[in-house]
Image: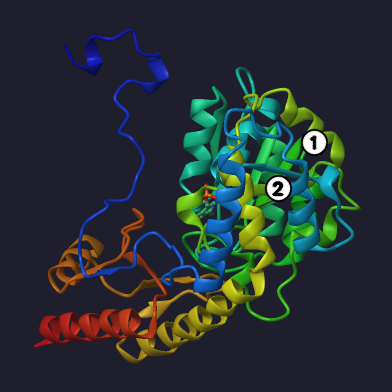
Amino acid sequence: MNLDDLPLRDDLRGMQPYGAPQLDVPVRLNTNENSYPLPEPVVSAVEKALGEVLRDLNRYPDRDAVALRADLAAYLGHGLSAENLWAANGSNEVQQQLLQAFGGPGRSALGFTPSYSMHPLLALSAGTRWIDGARAADFSIDVPAAIAQLDQHRPDVVFLCSPNNPTGTALDPAVTRAVLDAAPGMVVVDEAYAEFARPGTLSALELLDAYPRLVVTRTMSKAFAFAGARVGYLAAHPAVVDALQLVRLPYHLSALTQAAARAALRHADATLATVEAIKQQRDRIVRRLPELGLTVADSDANFVLFGGFDDQRALWRALLERGVLVRDVGLTGWLRVTAGTPEETSAFLDAAAAVLREETS
Ligand SMILES: *Cc1c(COP(=O)(O)O)cnc(C)c1O
């Protein structure tokens, strides 16, 4: 028996599971993780925190993760408190819960492509019709075009992503505001890479007071070097948090996860120091690739989208043969590379230079 013989939902038939290849190569720059491990003091603090909750694992965790939500609110600032925060196993789960609460059968969600490819998949799994919104040729979102698309489709949920994955560029706040003014339903701004933004970049957190249907999602997977722990969260009006309580599984966030996240947040300064190092490597990639004749998109994230070649699959394979794994995000003529440690970044830049030299010789 195989999958086709099962009475699977019609809309899931023929689908492939999502996921970048997890290949064992020397330089892995394909999933935008923080290339640095957790700093030692953070490891010790997490270890100690986990030890303290082990004795209570016979009990269910705090269902509402109130202490963690208060810590996350303190980290974000902007006058937020625990009632504005919600946390789950990665921002993917937070967004899934948002779609369960505000999408669902008979409803629709719209995002501006190319953007995070999980948004349409989460919509599908929640039975929500997905609408591919369009961007300008330079990947920016044109305000009149965005408003026209919202007026045409009237989506129940709109996804924005700032800095946008895979293009790397943060959204102009005027665009966010225009979408919030025109959208008939919820607007989710995915800020997974907010900590990597260039100075002066505004967060949609600034707009929460003015827009009660705005939700800003964040994650500890990137800046906090905590991808393996699975901790994502959102900030929104407390009524949004009430809505998510209707769809979340009881006890969805384990006591281990809550304790580990709180310990990591207490040591945020140590971990966030790696963000500065990564931003330097990101800027180095943005400077260097044009010298090799390539095109880059401005990046406020820990990755860079680069183009200027015809066949992204051939370049992806040639880099892999040199031990460097980057991401083919399915955009013809473009690839995405994560900014790594200085050594990883050098390995990528050297491999790219060597491949391009070979091509032109
Ligand atoms: C990596 C990433 C996330 C993170 O998802 P988690 O479930 O929190 O690990 C969310 N949104 C975008 C755009 C991302 O690139």
Q: Which residue is mark 1?
A: 240
Judging by the rendered image, the residue that carries numbered circle 2 is 234
Q: Secondary structure at mark 2?
A: strand
Residue at image x 39%, y 14%?
10
Residue 237 position by quadrant = top right
Residue 315: image x %, image y %? 21, 69
Which residue is nearer to you in this view: 355 or 190? 190
**For the point 38% across and 87% down, which residue is it?**
290
Q: Can you say whether 39 is above or below 250 in the image?
A: below
Mark 1 lies on a secondary structure that is: helix
Judge whether 239 appears above or below 225 on screen: above
In the displayed orientation, state which residue is furthest to the front: 55
> In this view, which residue lies farthest toward the bottom?
291
Q: Position of residue 27 (x, y in %)?
A: 26, 71
What is the crowding at mark 2: few (fewer than 14 residues within 10 Å), some, or many (at least 20)? many
Q: Please tell me which residue is depicted at 75% across the width and 69% down the height of the picture.
A: 202
* Label 1: how many Cα within 10 Å (few below 14, some 14–19, many 20+): many
Earlier residue among tags 1 and 2:
2
Q: Amino acid at mark 2?
A: Leu
Distance in Å between CA atoms under marks 1 and 2? 10 Å
Q: Are marks 1 and 2 in contact (CB under 8 Å)?
A: yes
The response on whether ligand 1 sits within 8 Å of label 1 is: no
Whether residue 185 is visible, yes or no, is yes
Colour convention of the picture: rainbow
Q: Amino acid at mark 1?
A: Val
Disc on res. 327: none
**Lateral position of residue 356 relative to residue 200, left or right:** left
